[in-house]
Amino acid sequence: MISMQLQQYWEQTLQTPRYADPRRLLRFGAKAYSQHDEDGLIGEIFRRIGVVNSTFIEIGVGPGKENNTLALLLSGWRGLWLDAGVKNVRDARTALEAYIQASRLRVEQAFVTRENIDSILADADAGKGGLGLMLKDAKFRQDLSSTLTQVNSLVSNINDGKGTLGKLATDDSVYTNVNKLLTASTDLVTTIRSDPKKYLTIHLKIF
């Protein structure tokens, strides 16, 4: 019932003038294997900017059943997953063994922080570990370089205030309105939980 109430609130919000623009990324949110709506958002972003290659790297993927790149993997992409949990890595390798055997996916254990990211990349450059092995692959290296170029361009546009993400990052009013939306959603859930009878009606028939 709470999910239904949130869905109704979300649909009503999208009808407001601010969110009526059909180009709003929020309208394309959809969940297949992501935790929230990232699958739909990522798909729409690449629909707009195009896909030069189909290579990904994701940090913190869990056991491989719910993350931001599983949908990409299943649609033909290839890449590398990194996770700090030994069990997560083991479970992901078991669940996606076929993709690993087909050289479509590598799953490695690594606790990535801002302090050790340089050393991880240095090891990769030296050909050590899963990332290093992948970088020895000429096609993967070329694809990764192209991907990073696109990312740098996207970040530059964001910093310049271009596009939805750019406005969110540079326009305080956009941030304020999004924050209000999240706060209102939280308040709605709290209200429903505090008085569920007001929103939930159960009809029981005995035959």
Image (cartoon, rainbow, N blue to C red):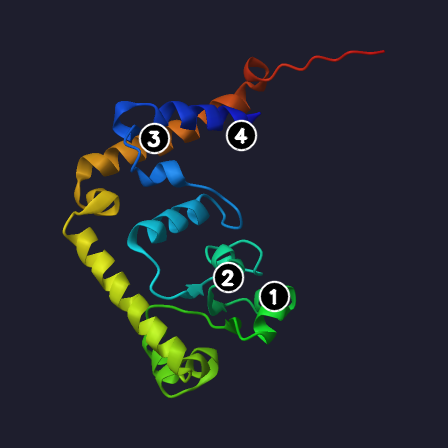
> How far apart are labels 4 and 2 at the CA level?
28 Å
- In the figure, 90 relative to 194: above or below? below
Q: Are marks 1 and 3 in contact (CB under 8 Å)?
A: no
Which of the two residues, 54 or 26, is positioned nearer the viewer here? Answer: 54
Taking the spot 82% from the left edge, 11% from the top edge, the residue there is: 206
Residue where numbered disc 2 is placed: 73
Nearest to N terminus: mark 1 or mark 2 = 2
Cα–Cα span, label 1 and label 3: 37 Å
Nearer the camera: disc 4 or disc 2: 2
What amino acid is found at the position of numbered circle 3 in the picture? Leu
Image coordinates of residue 1 in percent, x first then y, are 58, 25
Q: Distance between the residues labelled 4 and 3?
A: 16 Å
Q: Earlier in the sequence, mark 4 or mark 3?
A: 4
Circle nearer the N terminus (1, 3): 1
Q: Which of marks 3 and 2 is in front?
A: 2
Q: Residue 181 carries which label?
A: 3
Q: Which label sits in the foreground, 4 or 1?
A: 1
Residue 190 at least partly seen? no
46 left or right of 131?
A: left
Residue located beneath label 4 in the image: 3
- Identity, as a three-letter code, of the amino acid under mark 4: Ser
Contact check, label 1 and label 2, Cβ < 8 Å: yes
Residue count near mark 4 (Cα–Cα under 10 Å), binned few <14, some 14–19, many ≥20? few
Residue 188 is situated, as x and y percent measured from the top left of the image, at 45, 24
